[in-house]
Image (cartoon, rainbow, N blue to C red):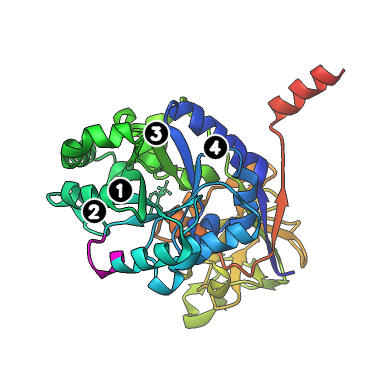
Amino acid sequence: MIAELTIDLGAIRRNVARLAAFVAPAGYAAVVKANAYGHGLVPVAQALASDVAALCVYRADEAATLREAGIATPILILGPIDPAELHGACDPRTSIALWSDGPFLDDLRRTASASGDRFGVHAKIDTGVTRLGLDRDRASAVIANYLADPHLDVRGVFTHLAAAEELESEFTLLQLERFTRALGPLEGILASRGVVRHAAASAAAMLFPNLRLDLIRAGIATYGIWPSNETRAAVAGALELEPALRWTTKLVVVRAVEAGRSVGYGCSFHTSRASRIGVLPIGYAEGIPRALSGSGVALVAGRKAPFVGRICMNMCFIDVTDVPEAAPGTCVTLVGRDGDGSIDPNDVAEAAGTIGYELVARLPSEIPRRYVETETAAIAAARSIVSS
Ligand SMILES: *Cc1c(COP(=O)(O)O)cnc(C)c1O
Protein backbone atom coordinates (compact mmCIF):
# COMPACT_ATOMS: atom_id res chain seq x y z
CA MET A 1 0.00 0.00 0.00
CA ILE A 2 1.68 3.19 -1.13
CA ALA A 3 -0.63 5.58 0.68
CA GLU A 4 -3.56 5.43 3.04
CA LEU A 5 -6.33 7.67 4.26
CA THR A 6 -7.50 7.12 7.82
CA ILE A 7 -10.91 8.63 8.44
CA ASP A 8 -12.18 9.18 11.96
CA LEU A 9 -15.95 8.74 11.81
CA GLY A 10 -16.13 9.65 15.51
CA ALA A 11 -14.66 13.07 14.70
CA ILE A 12 -17.18 13.54 11.88
CA ARG A 13 -20.08 12.69 14.19
CA ARG A 14 -18.79 15.05 16.86
CA ASN A 15 -18.41 17.86 14.31
CA VAL A 16 -22.04 17.35 13.31
CA ALA A 17 -23.16 17.29 16.95
CA ARG A 18 -21.25 20.49 17.76
CA LEU A 19 -22.31 22.47 14.72
CA ALA A 20 -25.90 21.21 15.04
CA ALA A 21 -26.01 22.47 18.63
CA PHE A 22 -24.44 25.76 17.50
CA VAL A 23 -27.12 26.39 14.85
CA ALA A 24 -30.15 24.91 16.65
CA PRO A 25 -33.09 25.09 16.21
CA ALA A 26 -32.13 24.98 12.52
CA GLY A 27 -31.83 21.43 11.21
CA TYR A 28 -28.64 19.92 9.80
CA ALA A 29 -28.27 18.54 6.29
CA ALA A 30 -24.83 16.98 5.74
CA VAL A 31 -23.35 17.54 2.29
CA VAL A 32 -21.66 14.33 1.09
CA LYS A 33 -21.04 15.23 -2.56
CA ALA A 34 -17.58 14.68 -4.09
CA ASN A 35 -17.17 11.34 -2.31
CA ALA A 36 -17.98 13.04 0.99
CA TYR A 37 -15.26 15.62 0.32
CA GLY A 38 -12.84 12.75 -0.27
CA HIS A 39 -13.71 11.01 3.00
CA GLY A 40 -15.76 8.24 1.31
CA LEU A 41 -19.44 8.59 0.42
CA VAL A 42 -21.02 5.43 1.83
CA PRO A 43 -19.10 5.07 5.11
CA VAL A 44 -19.60 8.75 5.98
CA ALA A 45 -23.29 8.66 5.04
CA GLN A 46 -23.78 5.49 7.09
CA ALA A 47 -22.11 7.07 10.09
CA LEU A 48 -24.36 10.14 9.86
CA ALA A 49 -27.58 8.56 8.61
CA SER A 50 -29.45 8.83 11.89
CA ASP A 51 -27.79 12.06 13.11
CA VAL A 52 -28.89 14.42 10.32
CA ALA A 53 -32.14 15.66 8.79
CA ALA A 54 -30.90 14.96 5.27
CA LEU A 55 -27.91 14.07 3.13
CA CYS A 56 -27.10 16.32 0.16
CA VAL A 57 -25.48 14.87 -2.95
CA TYR A 58 -24.74 16.46 -6.29
CA ARG A 59 -25.73 13.70 -8.72
CA ALA A 60 -28.58 11.22 -9.02
CA ASP A 61 -26.17 8.26 -9.13
CA GLU A 62 -24.77 9.28 -5.73
CA ALA A 63 -28.29 9.09 -4.32
CA ALA A 64 -28.73 5.66 -5.91
CA THR A 65 -25.46 4.47 -4.35
CA LEU A 66 -26.68 5.55 -0.91
CA ARG A 67 -30.01 3.75 -1.37
CA GLU A 68 -28.21 0.59 -2.52
CA ALA A 69 -26.15 0.79 0.66
CA GLY A 70 -29.40 0.66 2.62
CA ILE A 71 -29.45 4.28 3.75
CA ALA A 72 -33.04 5.49 4.30
CA THR A 73 -32.27 9.09 5.35
CA PRO A 74 -33.88 11.82 3.22
CA ILE A 75 -31.60 12.80 0.33
CA LEU A 76 -31.51 16.06 -1.60
CA ILE A 77 -29.90 15.97 -5.05
CA LEU A 78 -28.41 19.44 -5.53
CA GLY A 79 -27.24 19.23 -9.13
CA PRO A 80 -28.77 18.80 -12.57
CA ILE A 81 -30.33 15.44 -13.39
CA ASP A 82 -30.36 13.82 -16.79
CA PRO A 83 -33.93 12.85 -17.79
CA ALA A 84 -32.67 9.26 -18.22
CA GLU A 85 -31.80 9.17 -14.49
CA LEU A 86 -35.05 10.60 -13.23
CA HIS A 87 -36.73 7.33 -12.44
CA GLY A 88 -34.53 6.51 -9.44
CA ALA A 89 -35.07 9.99 -8.00
CA CYS A 90 -38.85 9.57 -7.87
CA ASP A 91 -38.82 8.17 -4.35
CA PRO A 92 -40.67 9.49 -1.30
CA ARG A 93 -37.40 9.94 0.64
CA THR A 94 -35.53 11.69 -2.18
CA SER A 95 -35.87 15.31 -3.27
CA ILE A 96 -34.47 17.06 -6.27
CA ALA A 97 -33.37 20.66 -6.61
CA LEU A 98 -35.63 22.26 -9.21
CA TRP A 99 -35.19 25.54 -11.06
CA SER A 100 -36.70 24.69 -14.41
CA ASP A 101 -39.92 25.79 -16.02
CA GLY A 102 -39.01 24.32 -19.39
CA PRO A 103 -39.28 20.89 -21.00
CA PHE A 104 -37.59 19.27 -18.00
CA LEU A 105 -40.90 19.66 -16.13
CA ASP A 106 -42.56 17.49 -18.78
CA ASP A 107 -39.91 14.83 -18.16
CA LEU A 108 -40.70 15.04 -14.45
CA ARG A 109 -44.44 14.72 -15.01
CA ARG A 110 -44.03 11.79 -17.37
CA THR A 111 -41.73 9.95 -14.96
CA ALA A 112 -44.00 10.67 -12.00
CA SER A 113 -47.07 9.43 -13.88
CA ALA A 114 -45.27 6.26 -14.93
CA SER A 115 -44.10 5.48 -11.40
CA GLY A 116 -47.29 6.59 -9.62
CA ASP A 117 -45.24 8.72 -7.22
CA ARG A 118 -44.51 12.43 -6.88
CA PHE A 119 -41.13 14.13 -7.07
CA GLY A 120 -39.97 15.70 -3.83
CA VAL A 121 -38.79 19.16 -4.77
CA HIS A 122 -36.64 21.88 -3.26
CA ALA A 123 -37.09 24.91 -5.50
CA LYS A 124 -33.87 26.82 -6.04
CA ILE A 125 -33.72 30.59 -6.41
CA ASP A 126 -30.64 32.42 -7.66
CA THR A 127 -29.94 35.39 -5.42
CA GLY A 128 -26.45 36.24 -6.55
CA VAL A 129 -24.22 33.29 -7.45
CA THR A 130 -25.53 33.38 -11.04
CA ARG A 131 -25.16 29.63 -11.32
CA LEU A 132 -28.25 27.44 -10.84
CA GLY A 133 -31.64 28.71 -9.75
CA LEU A 134 -34.71 30.59 -10.82
CA ASP A 135 -34.33 34.28 -11.62
CA ARG A 136 -35.66 35.94 -8.54
CA ASP A 137 -38.18 38.16 -10.28
CA ARG A 138 -39.93 35.11 -11.76
CA ALA A 139 -39.36 32.75 -8.87
CA SER A 140 -42.66 33.16 -7.04
CA ALA A 141 -44.74 32.60 -10.18
CA VAL A 142 -42.79 29.47 -11.15
CA ILE A 143 -42.85 28.08 -7.61
CA ALA A 144 -46.61 28.73 -7.44
CA ASN A 145 -46.88 26.42 -10.46
CA TYR A 146 -44.74 23.80 -8.73
CA LEU A 147 -47.05 24.03 -5.71
CA ALA A 148 -50.10 23.46 -7.90
CA ASP A 149 -48.56 20.57 -9.84
CA PRO A 150 -49.94 17.17 -8.75
CA HIS A 151 -46.68 15.48 -9.81
CA LEU A 152 -44.52 17.59 -7.51
CA ASP A 153 -44.32 17.68 -3.74
CA VAL A 154 -42.61 20.96 -2.83
CA ARG A 155 -40.72 20.37 0.42
CA GLY A 156 -38.18 23.15 0.38
CA VAL A 157 -37.14 26.47 -1.14
CA PHE A 158 -33.50 27.47 -1.08
CA THR A 159 -30.71 29.62 -2.35
CA HIS A 160 -26.91 29.49 -2.24
CA LEU A 161 -24.60 32.22 -0.99
CA ALA A 162 -21.68 33.66 -2.88
CA ALA A 163 -19.27 35.02 -0.32
CA ALA A 164 -20.18 34.08 3.25
CA GLU A 165 -16.78 32.50 3.97
CA GLU A 166 -15.10 35.74 3.00
CA LEU A 167 -17.22 37.49 5.63
CA GLU A 168 -18.91 39.51 2.89
CA SER A 169 -21.79 40.42 5.14
CA GLU A 170 -23.20 43.14 2.92
CA PHE A 171 -23.64 40.85 -0.07
CA THR A 172 -24.75 37.92 2.10
CA LEU A 173 -27.48 40.01 3.73
CA LEU A 174 -28.49 41.35 0.31
CA GLN A 175 -28.91 37.74 -0.83
CA LEU A 176 -31.11 37.02 2.19
CA GLU A 177 -33.22 40.07 1.41
CA ARG A 178 -33.61 38.99 -2.22
CA PHE A 179 -34.56 35.47 -1.14
CA THR A 180 -37.12 36.73 1.35
CA ARG A 181 -38.59 39.19 -1.14
CA ALA A 182 -38.80 36.57 -3.90
CA LEU A 183 -40.78 34.31 -1.58
CA GLY A 184 -42.98 37.09 -0.20
CA PRO A 185 -46.06 36.35 -2.34
CA LEU A 186 -45.92 32.68 -1.29
CA GLU A 187 -45.31 33.16 2.42
CA GLY A 188 -48.73 31.90 3.51
CA ILE A 189 -48.87 28.80 1.38
CA LEU A 190 -45.24 27.85 2.10
CA ALA A 191 -45.89 28.11 5.83
CA SER A 192 -49.17 26.18 5.66
CA ARG A 193 -47.50 23.36 3.75
CA GLY A 194 -44.49 23.22 6.07
CA VAL A 195 -42.03 23.98 3.27
CA VAL A 196 -38.53 24.44 4.72
CA ARG A 197 -36.31 27.38 3.75
CA HIS A 198 -32.54 27.09 3.58
CA ALA A 199 -29.58 29.14 2.43
CA ALA A 200 -26.52 28.59 4.58
CA ALA A 201 -23.58 26.31 3.88
CA SER A 202 -20.90 25.86 6.57
CA ALA A 203 -19.55 29.40 6.71
CA ALA A 204 -22.87 31.21 6.76
CA ALA A 205 -24.20 28.73 9.32
CA MET A 206 -21.35 29.74 11.63
CA LEU A 207 -21.26 33.45 10.92
CA PHE A 208 -24.79 34.62 10.09
CA PRO A 209 -27.47 33.51 12.57
CA ASN A 210 -30.27 35.02 10.48
CA LEU A 211 -29.29 32.91 7.48
CA ARG A 212 -29.69 29.60 9.30
CA LEU A 213 -33.44 29.62 8.57
CA ASP A 214 -34.92 26.10 8.90
CA LEU A 215 -31.95 24.04 7.77
CA ILE A 216 -28.25 24.39 7.11
CA ARG A 217 -26.38 22.49 4.38
CA ALA A 218 -22.99 21.82 5.91
CA GLY A 219 -20.23 20.21 3.89
CA ILE A 220 -16.70 21.22 4.79
CA ALA A 221 -17.36 21.73 8.52
CA THR A 222 -18.80 18.22 8.77
CA TYR A 223 -15.30 16.97 8.04
CA GLY A 224 -13.67 19.28 10.57
CA ILE A 225 -12.19 21.63 7.99
CA TRP A 226 -12.77 25.37 8.36
CA PRO A 227 -14.32 27.05 5.30
CA SER A 228 -11.65 29.76 5.46
CA ASN A 229 -9.15 31.26 7.88
CA GLU A 230 -11.47 34.25 8.31
CA THR A 231 -14.29 31.96 9.40
CA ARG A 232 -12.02 30.17 11.81
CA ALA A 233 -10.82 33.43 13.35
CA ALA A 234 -14.36 34.78 13.64
CA VAL A 235 -15.75 31.73 15.45
CA ALA A 236 -12.64 30.79 17.42
CA GLY A 237 -13.55 29.74 20.93
CA ALA A 238 -17.28 29.35 20.24
CA LEU A 239 -17.10 26.24 18.09
CA GLU A 240 -14.62 23.39 17.98
CA LEU A 241 -14.03 21.25 14.88
CA GLU A 242 -11.93 18.10 14.69
CA PRO A 243 -10.23 17.25 11.41
CA ALA A 244 -11.28 13.72 10.50
CA LEU A 245 -8.68 12.91 7.88
CA ARG A 246 -5.18 11.54 8.13
CA TRP A 247 -3.23 10.99 4.91
CA THR A 248 -0.05 9.00 5.14
CA THR A 249 2.52 7.34 2.93
CA LYS A 250 5.96 5.80 3.43
CA LEU A 251 9.43 6.79 2.38
CA VAL A 252 10.67 4.60 -0.48
CA VAL A 253 14.30 5.62 -0.39
CA VAL A 254 16.41 8.16 1.45
CA ARG A 255 19.38 9.49 -0.52
CA ALA A 256 22.39 11.11 1.09
CA VAL A 257 23.59 13.73 -1.38
CA GLU A 258 26.22 16.44 -1.43
CA ALA A 259 25.56 20.18 -1.51
CA GLY A 260 24.76 21.59 -4.95
CA ARG A 261 22.97 18.48 -6.21
CA SER A 262 19.87 19.00 -8.37
CA VAL A 263 16.67 17.20 -7.44
CA GLY A 264 13.80 16.33 -9.76
CA TYR A 265 12.47 17.51 -13.10
CA GLY A 266 13.61 20.85 -14.40
CA CYS A 267 16.49 20.88 -11.89
CA SER A 268 14.36 23.41 -10.03
CA PHE A 269 15.90 22.60 -6.65
CA HIS A 270 19.57 22.32 -5.67
CA THR A 271 20.66 21.20 -2.22
CA SER A 272 22.27 24.04 -0.32
CA ARG A 273 24.06 21.67 2.05
CA ALA A 274 24.87 17.99 2.36
CA SER A 275 21.34 16.63 2.53
CA ARG A 276 19.17 13.57 2.93
CA ILE A 277 16.44 13.53 0.31
CA GLY A 278 13.46 11.27 0.84
CA VAL A 279 11.49 9.93 -2.12
CA LEU A 280 7.74 9.40 -1.64
CA PRO A 281 5.81 6.94 -3.84
CA ILE A 282 2.92 9.29 -4.65
CA GLY A 283 2.59 12.40 -6.78
CA TYR A 284 -0.02 14.52 -8.47
CA ALA A 285 -1.81 11.45 -9.88
CA GLU A 286 -2.41 10.42 -6.26
CA GLY A 287 -3.72 13.81 -5.17
CA ILE A 288 -0.62 15.79 -4.17
CA PRO A 289 -1.07 19.18 -5.83
CA ARG A 290 1.74 19.86 -8.30
CA ALA A 291 1.68 23.41 -7.00
CA LEU A 292 3.32 22.07 -3.83
CA SER A 293 6.55 21.92 -5.82
CA GLY A 294 8.99 23.84 -3.64
CA SER A 295 6.48 24.70 -0.91
CA GLY A 296 4.69 23.04 1.96
CA VAL A 297 5.80 20.37 4.40
CA ALA A 298 5.11 16.79 5.41
CA LEU A 299 5.63 15.33 8.88
CA VAL A 300 8.19 12.61 9.57
CA ALA A 301 8.60 11.39 13.15
CA GLY A 302 6.53 14.39 14.22
CA ARG A 303 8.85 16.87 12.57
CA LYS A 304 8.47 19.04 9.49
CA ALA A 305 10.15 17.92 6.28
CA PRO A 306 9.75 20.40 3.40
CA PHE A 307 8.79 19.34 -0.12
CA VAL A 308 11.66 19.99 -2.51
CA GLY A 309 11.88 19.81 -6.28
CA ARG A 310 8.88 19.38 -8.53
CA ILE A 311 6.04 17.05 -7.66
CA CYS A 312 6.13 14.24 -10.26
CA MET A 313 3.15 12.26 -11.53
CA ASN A 314 3.66 9.34 -9.12
CA MET A 315 6.48 10.50 -6.86
CA CYS A 316 7.77 13.49 -4.96
CA PHE A 317 10.63 14.52 -2.67
CA ILE A 318 10.98 15.76 0.87
CA ASP A 319 14.08 17.02 2.62
CA VAL A 320 14.67 14.84 5.69
CA THR A 321 18.13 16.14 6.52
CA ASP A 322 16.91 17.26 9.94
CA VAL A 323 15.00 14.06 10.71
CA PRO A 324 17.65 11.43 11.51
CA GLU A 325 14.99 8.70 12.02
CA ALA A 326 13.88 8.96 8.39
CA ALA A 327 14.61 5.71 6.55
CA PRO A 328 12.94 3.62 3.86
CA GLY A 329 9.57 2.54 5.23
CA THR A 330 9.25 5.42 7.68
CA CYS A 331 5.72 6.82 7.83
CA VAL A 332 5.19 10.24 6.29
CA THR A 333 2.11 12.28 7.20
CA LEU A 334 0.78 14.59 4.51
CA VAL A 335 -2.38 15.61 6.39
CA GLY A 336 -3.19 14.98 10.03
CA ARG A 337 -1.40 14.51 13.30
CA ASP A 338 1.99 12.90 13.86
CA GLY A 339 3.45 13.20 17.36
CA ASP A 340 3.46 16.86 18.34
CA GLY A 341 3.03 18.01 14.75
CA SER A 342 -0.17 18.38 12.81
CA ILE A 343 -1.02 19.44 9.26
CA ASP A 344 -4.48 20.75 8.43
CA PRO A 345 -5.85 20.31 4.88
CA ASN A 346 -6.05 24.10 4.69
CA ASP A 347 -2.28 24.36 5.43
CA VAL A 348 -1.49 22.11 2.47
CA ALA A 349 -4.01 23.95 0.31
CA GLU A 350 -2.56 27.33 1.19
CA ALA A 351 0.96 26.18 0.32
CA ALA A 352 -0.41 24.98 -3.02
CA GLY A 353 -2.35 28.17 -3.72
CA THR A 354 -5.76 26.53 -3.40
CA ILE A 355 -8.40 25.83 -0.74
CA GLY A 356 -8.96 22.86 1.55
CA TYR A 357 -12.13 22.04 -0.38
CA GLU A 358 -10.19 21.34 -3.57
CA LEU A 359 -7.46 19.37 -1.82
CA VAL A 360 -9.86 16.87 -0.23
CA ALA A 361 -12.32 16.72 -3.14
CA ARG A 362 -9.47 15.64 -5.43
CA LEU A 363 -8.22 12.82 -3.23
CA PRO A 364 -8.49 9.88 -5.63
CA SER A 365 -11.17 7.35 -4.74
CA GLU A 366 -8.59 4.55 -5.29
CA ILE A 367 -6.52 5.49 -2.24
CA PRO A 368 -7.38 2.89 0.40
CA ARG A 369 -9.51 4.39 3.15
CA ARG A 370 -9.45 2.97 6.64
CA TYR A 371 -12.27 3.91 8.99
CA VAL A 372 -11.81 4.34 12.71
CA GLU A 373 -14.13 5.68 15.36
CA THR A 374 -12.23 7.47 18.10
CA GLU A 375 -13.61 9.00 21.23
CA THR A 376 -12.30 12.28 22.51
CA ALA A 377 -10.19 12.01 25.65
CA ALA A 378 -13.00 13.75 27.54
CA ILE A 379 -15.66 11.28 26.41
CA ALA A 380 -13.42 8.30 27.12
CA ALA A 381 -12.71 9.66 30.63
CA ALA A 382 -16.41 10.28 31.34
CA ARG A 383 -17.21 6.76 30.22
CA SER A 384 -14.58 5.20 32.47
CA ILE A 385 -16.01 7.13 35.43
CA VAL A 386 -19.49 5.86 34.64
CA SER A 387 -18.34 2.26 34.30
CA SER A 388 -16.11 2.20 37.40
C1 LIG B 1 -21.33 22.21 -1.68
C2 LIG B 1 -22.56 22.91 -1.29
C3 LIG B 1 -22.84 23.15 0.06
C4 LIG B 1 -21.85 22.86 1.17
O1 LIG B 1 -20.89 23.90 1.25
P1 LIG B 1 -19.79 23.90 2.43
O2 LIG B 1 -19.14 25.23 2.30
O3 LIG B 1 -18.87 22.77 2.14
O4 LIG B 1 -20.50 23.72 3.72
C5 LIG B 1 -24.07 23.69 0.37
N1 LIG B 1 -24.97 24.00 -0.60
C6 LIG B 1 -24.72 23.80 -1.90
C7 LIG B 1 -25.75 24.18 -2.91
C8 LIG B 1 -23.50 23.27 -2.29
O5 LIG B 1 -23.26 23.08 -3.59
- Find out if the beta carbon at label 4 lies less than 8 Å from the nearest ligand 1 atom: no
What separation in Å lies between label 3 and label 4 (alpha carbons)? 13 Å
Residue nearer the viewer, 223 or 141: 141
- Residue tagged 4: 16
- Residue tagged 1: 160
Numbered disc 1: secondary structure = loop
User: Are circles 3 and 2 on residues that touch, CB within 8 Å?
Assistant: no
What separation in Å lies between label 3 and label 2 (alpha carbons)? 20 Å
Tell me the number on the disc at residue 129. 2
- Find out if the beta carbon at label 1 lies less than 8 Å from the nearest ligand 1 atom: yes
Q: Report x, y in % for residue 230.
A: 35, 39
Magenta part of the chain: 100-105
Closer to the chain start, of discs 1 and 3, is: 1
Amino acid type at circle 4 is Val
User: Are circles 1 and 2 on residues that touch, CB within 8 Å?
Assistant: yes
Amino acid type at circle 2 is Val
Residue sitting at x 63%, y 67%: 274
Tell me the number on the disc at residue 206. 3
Q: Quadrant of the C terminus?
A: top right
